[in-house]
Image (cartoon, rainbow, N blue to C red):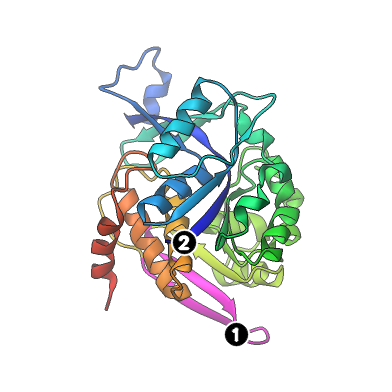
Amino acid sequence: MGKAICFGITCLDILVPGLDPSEFYKETIRLNDFSYSTGGDAINEAVTLAKLGHEPVLMTALADDAMGRLLTDLGRARGVNMDHVKKARTHQTAVSIVCVHRDGERNFIVNDGSDNEIGEETADWDAAKDAGVFCVGSAYGAKGLTESLPAVLKRAKELGLTTCVDIMIGSEYVGKESEADPAAFLKYADYIFPNQNEARWMTSETDPDAMAEKLLAMGAGCVVLKDGENGCCLYRRAGGAILRKTFVPAVRCEVVDTTGAGDNFLAGFTAGLLEGKSDEDCAKLATATASASVRYLGAAGLKDRAEVEEILKGMRP
């Protein structure tokens, strides 16, 4: 078992399944059911890491309200160390209403919540000293979190942790590419995990290889460029201006809900790092984990490591 720090956004997800976008125009919509679960990039990664057999420590901000207490109980019940969560002072606990369409895609309705209070002080460095990996979920998801990343990632590197940074373009950053400044934190990022839309936003490039080239030039150690149902490509420098590119295909499966697929991907990759796997094998474990997750409603549907290992068997040549 390896220990990983999951730093970033946590919220309560209220999952509303089976909606067609046209139904939002109706005055009243009656559903068979809806549910709630842990949500937000950091706790999604933590919950999945626990299911994969590792020790996740969550570092986030939650209010001392009913939703914050519920999230704390849910996290602990799912194997997450919740002892280092900071108390939000001026915001309610973050809540996300996840409207899941019939094709598995979704829209989010969120409050102005506790994720706004995530910053440098959220990190508990005493708890991080014996960890192996420091995961961020996610850069550009909240302004304070993003602005803290140069200092936070630098400190994590000083402690000898491998740093992994996921990307999510939150509403505060939409249309504000000029304010992004990814180079400020990428020089401390061993691995970065954008999808192609996010990489395009960060680099202003349209070709995937050019996106990766620019992100590596900004300082990222390895770019794991995700392309949804097509898989992902890993990029590293192989000397001079030459890129080493490795493609890992996705696993075809029936999709119920894509919520948290990227978070599960990062959790699988982090598990591989903690187990000493190669980058390619980490990406395969990540792909299998994400594939298992989208078969369920919500980000925390994955059952256990055995389910992921069964998918991995079909990926091996």
Q: Position of residue 129 (x, y in %)?
A: 62, 58
SS of the residue under disc 1? loop
In this view, the mark in front (2 or 1)? 2
Residue at the (67%, 42%) spot, across then down: 122
Instruction: Give, as a three-letter code, the residue at label 1.
Output: Ala
Q: Position of residue 136 (x, y in %)?
A: 59, 52
Figure check: 103 above or below 221? above
Q: Which residue is mark 2?
A: 2
Residue at the (34%, 17%) spot, across then down: 29
Please identify the residue farthest to the top as the structure is shown.
Answer: 27
Q: Which residue is mark 1?
A: 238
* Nearer the observer, 155 or 310: 155
Instruction: Give, as a three-letter code, the residue at label 2.
Output: Gly
Which segment did they paint magenta? 229-249
Can see residue 243?
yes
Figure check: 313 above or below 123? below
